[in-house]
Amino acid sequence: MGRVLQVRVLAYTYAEDDVRKAWPLLWKLAFEDNTPGFPHEMKGVLELVRALDDLYQFGDVPDEVRRLLEDGLPRVVKDVKDMQARLADWDPQAANQATDRIEEGLGELEKRVAKP
């Protein structure tokens, strides 16, 4: 790796519409009902997790929403950190496994929000 030109392994969301379709209730909660406190170019999976975590930690949300997020969001946030660490370690297989856990965790949260 060069001093100026560096190579990074990264993960990103190709199309934010895929995120909106996969987790419409979480999308609405994070990006429509509440405005994230950070600028973003795209509303992808990682931005969704970040917005939900900010909402959970700092937002003014009803108690039932907070309880729903409390049950699964910390694990998803941990999986995002794990994925980022695996990418930094140049371990794409472990990073890919973490992406599966992230998506599964968001799926579980979506189900909980749908049936409070």
Image: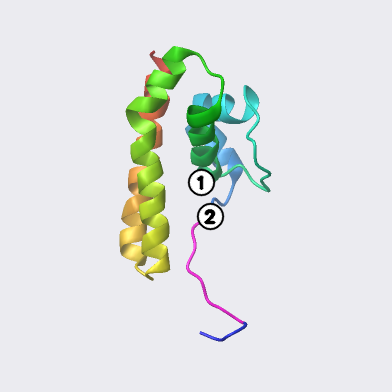
Whole-angstrom CA distance, mark 2 to mark 1, is: 8 Å
Q: Would residue 55 be visible to someone looking at this image?
A: yes
Give whichever of discs 2 and 1 has the lower sequence position: 2
Q: Quadrant of residue 93?
A: bottom left
- Within 10 Å of disc 1 (Cα), the crowding (few <14, some 14-19, many 20+) is some
- Residue 29, position as x, y percentages in the image: 55, 24
Q: Which residues are magenta?
A: 5-11
Q: How is the image coloured?
A: rainbow
Picture residue at 37% right of the left edge, 69% below the top: 89
Left or right: residue 17 compared with residue 100: right
Q: Is residue 99 magenta?
A: no
- Residue 81, position as x, y percentages in the image: 40, 52
- Within 10 Å of disc 2 (Cα), the crowding (few <14, some 14-19, many 20+) is few
Q: Is residue 8 magenta?
A: yes
Q: Report the amino acid beneath label 2.
A: Tyr
Q: Which residue is mark 2?
A: 12
Q: Residue furthest bottom?
A: 2
Q: Is residue 42 above or below residue 2?
A: above
Picture residue at 62% right of the left edge, 25% below the top: 34
**SS label for mark 1:** helix
Q: Is residue 28 above or below residue 86?
A: above
Which of the image's four quarters has the C terminus?
top left
Q: Which residue is mark 1?
A: 46
Picture residue at 66% right of the left edge, 46% below the top: 40
Do the CB atoms of the residues marked 2 and 1 lie less than 8 Å apart? yes
**SS label for mark 2:** loop
Q: Report the amino acid beneath label 1.
A: Leu
Give the number of the mark in front: 2 or 1.
1
- Residue 92, position as x, y percentages in the image: 37, 65
Q: What mark, if any, has residue 101 been given in the picture?
A: none
Main secondary structure along the magenta-highlighted residues: loop
